[in-house]
Image (cartoon, rainbow, N blue to C red):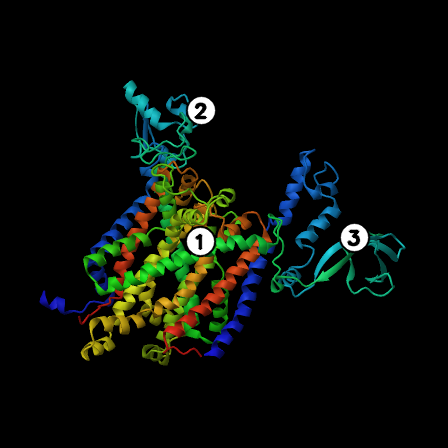
């Protein structure tokens, strides 16, 4: 059993690599990426003379609509497009050295040695040796920190352009998801608060669905064919026929104060921070609940129908089995037969569904987050695609993929725990 | 007569008879088929072009012939004739000219704002479900979107099935390296959040109807493939397959002539659920703005406008209502189909 799970965990690695390679290639090959977008923005900015375009603006020759070569080079380097795709992927993973702290050094014809200021009064000496560049520190030894390379695209006929840089290994494997283009913050910092919001909704919703669905399913199975069973089936049909986020929209219209009753807020995770901080603890709890009720209803409705039916059918199936007949035959009371013998076997399919639900908790809720205008994890990922914010998009997908892979294994562990007959090999 | 009843019916026929006894599902099925059939003739029923125009003794059929300038019918308007006004003026003037309009004379693309400000008109007798943010008739858009939604789901499901049977069937039947290879691909594929991948692709290329279906198919074939793999894997070891093989049937024939008919149960019972998935996905994508290109009528787009202007309740209720009723009907069908194909009799001792 243990070896099985160890193998499963090891198998995660190729799957993870496969899916990230796939996403990476789709994103990198896509036209209209961040580079094109920035160039467009800069050009549009240059057209409207006199308007500030941002820090890169001053590199540009004022007014012309074509970016100068050096600015292009810098942009390409910033977005990492100066490297082939496979290198970009490996750098992003963190197993290929990432070049940082770039400085450009130009060799005039005939020159083979140059000094370059690297700040704090320190100088590095660059020496051209054929096709390569050697960096020497102040003692005249080959520098271990600084490296240099010839930029073939940037070099003209007689001028050789080289770049001086440091390298480091930093990528997702070292926990560095990069820096967001739009928020101008490390991706992890952008994610953390939003992740908490989504977890809050996900866990509360999941807990509620389980608390409602399992008893409801049991009751429905035990009273199969009764009026209660019929009425709750109607509710389940309705719940299944309307996507949660669409139901959320209807609830907002009805109860959000637009056209009918004004009971719940129109959206948001909680009251704005400045109001939130003046509240007492009790008020905060109340405010949080007040904001969360509608989204949680919308969130739970989808799994509500499926889970109840699953529970009901599973129990019904078990109750008609021979071992229940035996239990009755040896004179056990009905309560004991149902609650001890039948239920235990009926929760098996539900336990195996746990992993799937965890995956949905994180990624499946951006429609709901959009409807209720909640600044959650899913909405962040969605917005990142719109903004071509690749570090966030990739980071988002990485986290979702990992969660799903882990959730799958968790499902199996849960299954093996509730069902001792199951032997994974 | 009694002798005829002795003849045993084919299993499919039995199932069909059983399905017919499940009234809720059976009537939903008939209603849905009729509605979908009708929806192909929507241009005849809901449109702003006249079906027949008789002007000074000459008949013309704008619904077929398309564009007619207003001046052709003596109407002093720039561009195309406005048939509704034409009808009214001819009626009031008591002229010999006449025209027949479709039952509901508004097109889903027609901007009615040109005739007075009709933006966000609440539901009324002329506009049954009001108008939207650009003054287009909501009811008319809703009906056209019904056709598109169902067609989308049908084509999508069919494609998924073809892929699923081909790939999944081969995986289960052939096994070996082929199976292993595709299993890894499926594992990778299914670890990705699919709606998200569609959004990424859609944000790069603006999809048309078929492009969207294509994109959706490449991310959505897994469910059916897995189902078919399991089915073919199970059937392969049965005696009839061995018998067919020993008689020299080719693999191809064994797969599609012998095994496939025996794997029909999951194919058919899964069908309505796949339709539900397709419809909901399209609504979601349209809501996010990554579905059909505008101005294609769609429920999701209506809902998006409605949720931005929460006080315009009909813009939310109309599409959600349409979606709900459609999905509910498909659900009823799904329930009945499952009951007919895979009946479960639960017995209880007490």
Structural crowding at the residue carrying mark 3, measured as other residues with C-alpha within 10 Å and reported as few (<14), some (14–19) or many (≥20): some
Tell me residue A103's x, y (percent). Answer: 77, 53
Structural crowding at the residue carrying mark 1, measured as other residues with C-alpha within 10 Å and reported as few (<14), some (14–19) or many (≥20): many
Image check: B181 left or right of B83? Answer: right
Q: How many marks?
A: 3
Q: Based on the displayed image, in which of its 4 quarters is residue A116 positioned?
A: bottom right
Report the Cα–Cα distance between label 3 and label 1.
46 Å
Nearest to the observer: residue A77 or residue B115: A77
Q: Quadrant of the N terminus of chain A?
A: bottom left
Q: Are marks 3 and 2 in contact (CB under 8 Å)?
A: no
Question: In the rendered structure, which disc, 3 or 1, sits on the residue that comes first in sequence?
Answer: 3
Report the Cα–Cα distance between label 3 and label 2.
63 Å
Q: Which residue is mark 3?
A: A104
| Circle 1 chain | A
Foreground disc of the pair 3, 1? 1
Q: Which residue is mark 2?
A: B78
| Circle 2 chain | B
Q: Are marks 1 and 2 in contact (CB under 8 Å)?
A: no
Nearest to the observer: residue A419 or residue B334: A419
Residue drawn 31% across and 38% down? B45
């Amino acid at each position: 059993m243990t070896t099985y799970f160890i193998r499963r965990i090891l198998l995660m690695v190729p799957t993870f690599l496969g899916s990230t390679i796939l996403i990476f290639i789709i994103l990198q090959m896509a036209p209209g990426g961040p580079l094109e977008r920035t160039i467009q923005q800069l050009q549009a900015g240059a057209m409207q003379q006199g308007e500030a375009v941002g820090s890169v603006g001053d590199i540009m020759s004022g007014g012309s609509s074509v970016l100068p070569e050096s600015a292009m080079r810098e942009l390409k380097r910033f977005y990492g497009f100066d490297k082939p795709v496979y290198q970009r992927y490996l750098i992003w993973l963190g197993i290929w050295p990432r070049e940082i702290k770039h400085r450009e050094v130009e060799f005039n014809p005939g020159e083979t040695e140059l000094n370059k200021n690297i700040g704090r009064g320190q100088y590095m000496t660059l020496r051209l040796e054929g096709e390569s560049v050697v960096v020497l520190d102040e003692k005249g030894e080959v520098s271990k920190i600084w490296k240099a390379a010839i930029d073939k695209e940037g070099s003209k006929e007689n001028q050789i352009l080289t770049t001086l840089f440091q390298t480091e290994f930093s990528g997702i494997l070292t926990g560095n998801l990069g820096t967001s283009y739009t928020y101008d913050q490390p991706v992890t910092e952008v994610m953390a608060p939003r992740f908490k919001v989504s977890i809050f909704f996900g866990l509360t919703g999941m807990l509620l669905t389980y608390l409602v669905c399992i008893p409801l399913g049991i009751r429905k199975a035990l009273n199969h064919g009764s009026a209660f069973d019929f009425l709750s089936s109607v509710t389940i049909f309705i719940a299944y026929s309307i996507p949660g986020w669409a139901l959320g929209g209807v609830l907002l219209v009805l109860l959000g104060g637009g056209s009918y009753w004004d009971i719940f807020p129109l959206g948001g995770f909680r009251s704005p921070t400045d109001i939130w901080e003046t509240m007492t603890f009790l008020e905060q709890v109340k405010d949080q609940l007040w904001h969360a009720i509608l989204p949680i209803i919308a969130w739970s409705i989808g799994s509500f129908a499926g889970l109840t039916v699953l529970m009901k059918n599973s129990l019904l199936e078990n109750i008609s089995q021979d071992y229940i007949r035996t239990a009755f035959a040896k004179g056990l009371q009905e309560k004991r037969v149902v609650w001890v013998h039948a239920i235990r076997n009926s929760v098996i399919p539900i336990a195996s569904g746990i992993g799937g639900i965890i995956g949905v908790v994180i990624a499946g809720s951006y429609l709901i987050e959009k409807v209720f205008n909640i600044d959650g994890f899913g909405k962040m990922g969605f917005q990142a695609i719109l903004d071509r914010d690749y570090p966030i998009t990739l980071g988002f997908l990485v986290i979702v993929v990992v969660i799903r892979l882990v959730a799958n294994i968790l499902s199996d562990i849960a299954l093996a725990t509730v069902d001792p007959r199951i032997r994974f090999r | 007569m009694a002798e005829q009843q002795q003849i045993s019916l084919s299993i499919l026929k039995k199932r069909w008879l059983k399905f017919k006894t499940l009234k809720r599902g059976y009537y939903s099925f008939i209603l849905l088929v009729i509605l979908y059939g009708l929806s192909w003739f929507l241009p005849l029923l809901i449109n702003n072009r006249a079906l027949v125009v008789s002007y000074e003794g000459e008949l013309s059929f704008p619904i077929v012939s398309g564009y007619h300038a207003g001046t052709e019918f003596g109407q002093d308007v720039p561009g195309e004739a406005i048939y509704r006004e034409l009808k009214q003026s001819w009626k009031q003037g008591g002229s010999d000219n006449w025209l027949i309009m479709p039952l509901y004379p508004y097109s889903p693309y027609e901007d009615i704002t040109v005739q007075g400000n009709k933006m966000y008109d609440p539901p009324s007798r002329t506009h049954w479900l009001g108008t939207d943010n650009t003054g287009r008739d909501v009811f008319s858009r809703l009906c056209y979107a019904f056709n598109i939604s169902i067609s989308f789901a049908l084509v999508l499901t069919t494609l998924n099935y073809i892929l699923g049977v081909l790939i999944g069937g081969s995986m289960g039947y052939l096994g070996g390296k082929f199976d292993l290879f595709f299993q890894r691909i499926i594992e990778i594929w299914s670890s990705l959040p699919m709606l998200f991948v569609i959004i990424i692709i859609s944000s790069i290329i603006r999809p048309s109807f078929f492009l969207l279906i294509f994109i959706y198919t490449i991310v959505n074939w897994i469910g059916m493939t897995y189902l078919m793999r399991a089915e073919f894997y199970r059937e392969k070891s049965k005696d009839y397959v061995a018998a067919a093989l020993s008689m020299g049937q080719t693999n191809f024939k064994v797969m599609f002539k012998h095994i496939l008919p025996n794997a029909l149960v999951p194919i058919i019972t899964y069908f309505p659920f796949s339709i539900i998935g397709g419809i909901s996905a399209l609504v979601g994508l349209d809501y996010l703005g990554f579905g059909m290109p505008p101005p294609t009528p769609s429920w999701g787009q209506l809902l998006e406008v409605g949720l931005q202007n929460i006080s315009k309740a009909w813009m939310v209720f109309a599409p959600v209502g349409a979606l709900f009723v459609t999905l509910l009907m498909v659900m009823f069908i799904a329930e009945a189909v499952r009951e007919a194909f895979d009946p479960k009799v639960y017995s209880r001792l007490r």
